[in-house]
Image (cartoon, helix red, strand yellow):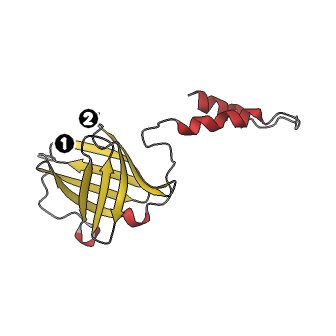
């Protein structure tokens, strides 16, 4: 919040005093380290991560969908997470916020990605998870839906 106020104070328009100190803009820099839960817009293009990815973890089907810089994760049992995916500081990262408050897959670092598979190490208790790319970029039919639409 203070970072937003500092940024707002720096973006004032119309002042004719060109001799103002550059100090206010320097105070905004430390706010870039704040944890925004993946909504801070820090990621750039997700390139190779694009598409629909499937995994089975602890007996549950997990679908990870990446479109542009947006990511969504769905797991049987009702887990629904949304966030961002892309490059940060030379690494491919995924940041998710789950509707049930789970932090099991909050931040993921992509260890490897190829045409057919992707391995992600999550900061939560899930740890390493290996995904297989869905055919044609679409999820296969017959995935469990947890009684959605019934």
The residue labelled by disc 2 is 100
> Could you tell me how far apart the alpha carbons at marks 1 and 2 are, in whole angstroms?
9 Å
The local secondary structure at tag 2 comes to loop
The local secondary structure at tag 1 comes to loop
Residue drawn at point x = 28 percent, y = 68 percent: 137
Closer to the camera, 45 or 139?
A: 45
Circle 2 residues within 10 Å: few <14, some 14–19, many ≥20 = few
Of mark 1 and mark 2, the one earlier in the sequence is: 1
Tell me: 68 left or right of 26.
Answer: left
Among the 4 quarters of the image, the one containing residue 55:
bottom left
Tell me: 17 left or right of 42.
Answer: right
Closer to the camera, 91 or 55?
A: 91
Q: Quick check: 2 above or below 111?
A: above
Image spot of residue 67 (x, y percent): 38, 59
Image spot of residue 63 (x, y percent): 23, 55
Badges 1 and 2: C-beta atoms under 8 Å apart? yes
Circle 1 residues within 10 Å: few <14, some 14–19, many ≥20 = few
Q: Quick check: 124 above or below 133?
A: above
Q: Quick check: 20 above or below 142?
A: above
Residue sitting at the far top? 2
Tell me: 27 left or right of 114.
Answer: right
Residue drawn at point x = 23 percent, y = 67 percent: 134
Image spot of residue 78 (x, y percent): 18, 42
Residue drawn at point x = 26 percent, y = 61 percent: 53
Q: What number of labels is visible?
A: 2
Residue drawn at point x = 82 percent, y = 33 percent: 21
Closer to the camera, 30 or 84?
A: 30
Mark carried by residue 103: none
Image spot of residue 44 (x, y percent): 50, 57
Among the 4 quarters of the image, the one containing residue 118:
bottom left
Image quarter where the N terminus lies is top right
The residue labelled by disc 1 is 78
């Amino acid at each position: 919040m203070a970072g937003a106020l500092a940024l707002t104070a720096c973006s004032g328009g119309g002042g004719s005093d060109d001799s103002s100190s550059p100090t206010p803009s320097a105070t905004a820099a430390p706010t870039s380290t704040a944890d925004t839960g993946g909504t801070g817009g820090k990621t750039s293009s997700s390139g190779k991560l694009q598409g629909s990815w499937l995994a089975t973890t602890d007996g549950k089907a997990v679908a990870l969908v990446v479109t542009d810089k947006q990511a969504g994760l769905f797991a049987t049992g009702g887990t629904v997470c949304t966030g961002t995916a892309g490059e940060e500081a030379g690494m491919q990262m995924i940041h998710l916020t789950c509707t049930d408050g789970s932090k099991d897959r909050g931040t993921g670092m992509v260890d490897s990605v190829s045409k057919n598979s992707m391995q992600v190490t999550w900061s939560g208790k899930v740890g390493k998870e290996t995904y297989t790319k869905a055919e044609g970029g679409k999820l296969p039919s017959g995935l469990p839906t947890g009684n959605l639409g019934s």
